[in-house]
């Protein structure tokens, strides 16, 4: 999987619409995730400007600046803009100073945008995490420690939970049905201090995996950084394929998406 996001298009969008590396007073920050398991690589246009090109399933951009207000988001199968209709054409409203994740989710036949507001704040010395259910045919699930009480309960498809602030550390988590049947083992999940995470369950139910994104990292004594590079939270399982989304520093939307099977 060697498709990359168009650096040129992204930088041009940021320069022309935002005028800086961080959101200005009247800007929001938006990242885009390809979460449709049977959709092809896609191009994404915002208000007629190409912001993502050739994004494969499980790809995620860094945050990009976008002026507050209403915008038209159109998603095309890669390379078909001008020759075919978009597979999604949907309005998106963003507020100044806010950050958002916009996921293209569901199956290709029913493709839609799932929009969530992201947190750019964490108590110093703590970690914060939320869970998103983006697997179109997976059942309602809970997420919590193996054999323990659920941290997140009753998450249905397209639900993105509120954040929970936790002590940093390594957690033996699992995704399970409300009846207690394990759906996916997430033992060895490491949550670092001063970091905010979004953990998205993606793919089909028989190939369920997680996409871990860092929403925010608080750097003591320096400016806050979003979309930080470096390894995302690691999970371990004998059969669990993990997608680690690593954002490039500096605001360009070049993302290397690594898929690994980790051993216990």
Image (cartoon, rainbow, N blue to C red):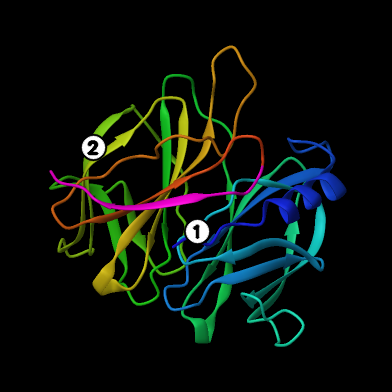
Comparing 241 with 166, the one in front is: 241
| Coordinates of residue 232 in the picture (x, y in percent) | 40, 40
**Left or right of 176 on screen, residue 85:** right
Which disc number belongs to residue 171? 2
| Coordinates of residue 158 in the picture (x, y in percent) | 47, 67
Question: Helix, strand, or loop for circle 2?
Answer: strand
Write down the residue under mark 1: 59
Q: Estimate how packed mark 2 is, as few (under 14), some (14 to 19) or many (20 or more) residues with alpha carbons within 10 Å.
A: some
Tag count? 2
Does any portion of residue 67 appear in the rendered image? Answer: no
For the N terminus, the image quarter is: bottom left
Residue 262 is one of the magenta-drawn residues: yes
Does any portion of residue 189 appear in the rendered image? Answer: yes
Which image quarter: residue 207?
bottom left
Residue mark closest to the camera, 1 vs 2: 1
Residue 163 is one of the magenta-drawn residues: no
- The residue that appears at 30% across and 35% down in the rendered structure is 190
Comparing 254 with 131, the one in front is: 254
Q: What stretch is highlighted in magenta?
A: 252-264
């Amino acid at each position: 999987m060697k498709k990359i996001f168009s650096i040129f298009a992204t930088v041009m969008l940021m320069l022309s619409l935002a005028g800086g590396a961080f959101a200005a007073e009247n800007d929001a920050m938006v990242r885009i995730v390809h979460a449709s398991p049977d959709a092809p690589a896609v191009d994404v246009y915002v208000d007629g400007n190409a912001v993502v090109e050739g994004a494969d399933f499980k790809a995620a951009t860094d945050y990009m600046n976008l002026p507050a207000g209403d915008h038209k988001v159109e998603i095309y199968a890669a390379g078909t803009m001008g020759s075919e209709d978009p597979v999604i054409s949907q309005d998106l409203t963003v507020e100044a100073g806010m950050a958002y994740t916009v996921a293209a989710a569901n199956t290709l036949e029913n493709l839609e945008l799932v929009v969530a507001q992201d947190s750019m704040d964490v108590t110093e010395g703590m970690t914060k995490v939320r869970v998103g259910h983006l697997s179109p045919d997976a059942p309602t699930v809970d997420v919590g420690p193996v054999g323990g009480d659920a941290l997140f309960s009753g998450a249905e498809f397209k639900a993105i939970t509120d954040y929970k602030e936790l002590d940093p550390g390594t957690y033996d988590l699992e995704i399970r049905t409300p009846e207690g049947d394990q759906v996916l083992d997430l033992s060895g999940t490491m949550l670092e201090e001063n970091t905010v995470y979004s953990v998205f369950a993606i793919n089909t139910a028989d190939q369920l995996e997680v996409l871990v994104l860092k929403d925010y990292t608080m750097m003591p004594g320096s400016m806050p950084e979003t979309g930080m590079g470096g390894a995302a939270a690691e999970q371990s399982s004998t059969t669990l394929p993990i997608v680690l989304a690593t954002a490039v520093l500096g605001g360009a939307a070049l993302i290397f998406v690594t898929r690994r099977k980790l051993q216990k």
